[in-house]
Image (cartoon, rainbow, N blue to C red):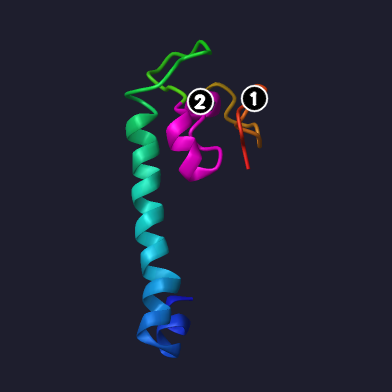
Amino acid sequence: WALLLYSVSYEVGVFGFSIPAVLSFHFYGLINYLGHTFGHRPLVTNDTSTNHWFVNLFVFGEGWHQNHHRIQSSHRIGLRRGELDI
């Protein structure tokens, strides 16, 4: 995919592949950092995972990190009313 985009032009490769890849890497790192450091813990788990509404604004549901740890096999991370999970 990257080679195809860069073969079109340098700008298409940068804006179509490189920038989205770097942003994705950093946002998912932010999820793991904030999801185990700050936030609220509405569920009982054996780890330090938390839910963080602010992170959720940028990653469309992944901010409900404790929900993910509690019910790992669920396709839906937003478990309660008001927990937006796109």
The residue drawn where x is 65% and y is 34% is 76
Residue 64 included in the magenta stretch of the image: yes
Q: Main secondary structure of the magenta part?
A: helix
Snapshot quadrant of residue 15: bottom left
Q: From this view, report whether residue 64 is shown above or below residue 18.
A: above
Cα distance in 3D space between marks 2 and 1: 12 Å
Q: What is the span of residues highlighted in magenta in the rendered image?
A: 52-68
Mark closest to the chain's N terminus, 2 or 1: 2
Relative horizontal placement of residue 2, taking residue 42 as reference (left or right): left
Residue for badge 2 = 69
Q: Are marks 2 and 1 in contact (CB under 8 Å)?
A: no
Residue for badge 1 = 79
Q: Give how far across and how far down residue 37 sits, in percent.
A: 32, 24
The residue drawn where x is 40% and y is 88% is 9
Residue 28 included in the magenta stretch of the image: no
Q: Looking at the picture, which amino acid does disc 2 mark? A: His
Snapshot quadrant of residue 71: top right
Q: Quadrant of the C terminus?
A: top right
Q: From this view, report whether residue 35 is shown above or below residue 16.
A: above
Q: Give how far across and how far down residue 35 sits, in percent.
A: 39, 29
What kind of element bears circle 1? loop
Relative horizontal placement of residue 73, taking residue 4 as reference (left or right): right
Q: From this view, report whether residue 24 is shown above or below residue 86.
A: below
